[in-house]
Amino acid sequence: MTTIIIPQLDANLVDVTITRWRKQAGDVVAAGEIVADLTTDKAAYELEAPASGTLLAIIAVEKSIVLAGSAIGIIGEPGEELTALPAGANPEGRAALPASANVPPRVRATPRARRLAQEKGLDLAKIQTETGAEIIDEAVLARYL
């Protein structure tokens, strides 16, 4: 079995959003094939499969925010049974944060939206949760003004 791990894409990278899985559990993948799209606060990336085989499990679901180095999926041999999840994963489908990581939830918003939210006393984290927006801009905030 091979674990799909979020690479350290940037020296300052803390968390990564799994934007979209291009493969589903049970799909056959080839080493180097794009299996997921990732987004950071600065860029978008395509994640390649580290090995060939069958995608046995997706540990971190789409829209999950995970730390660099987190396990997000498992590749194995066709027909292989998954007996246990790797360390750092939980059965709810999201990569678990280490206990030592006191990382506050990151709200991605444009500078103009941040300024406007501060002026109007709006909670950007609550707005992001309610709307599901990856990045909050003025158009998203317009519904709350």
Image: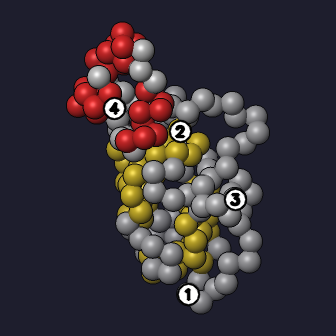
**First-in-chain label (3 vs 2):** 2
Residue 6 drawn at (x, y percent): 54, 50
| Element on which disc 4 rests | loop
| Amino acid carrying mark 3 in the image | Asn
Find the distance from the CA under tag 3 to the CA under tag 4.
Answer: 29 Å
Would you place residue 34 above or below residue 120 in this image? Answer: below
Q: Residues within 10 Å of mark 2 (few under 14, many from 20)?
A: many
* Disc 4 target residue: 136
Q: Nearer the viewer, residue 20 or 2?
A: 20
Q: Quadrant of residue 101?
A: top right
Q: Specify which label sits upstream in the sequence, 3 or 4.
A: 3
Residue identifier under label 1: 78
Closer to the observer: label 4 or label 1?
Answer: 4
The residue labelled by disc 2 is 15
Give neighbour class at mark 3: few <14, some 14-19, many 20+ (Cα, 10 Å): some
Tag in front: 1 or 2? 2
Q: Which mark is residue 90?
A: 3
Residue drawn at (32%, 15%) of the image: 116
Q: CA distance from mark 4 to mark 2?
A: 17 Å
Residue 100 point in image, percent of width and height: 76, 34
Give amino acid for label 2. Answer: Asp
The first of marks 4 and 2 along the sequence is: 2
Q: Residues within 10 Å of mark 1 (few under 14, many from 20)?
A: some
32 or 40: nearer the viewer: 40
Q: How is the image coloured?
A: secondary structure
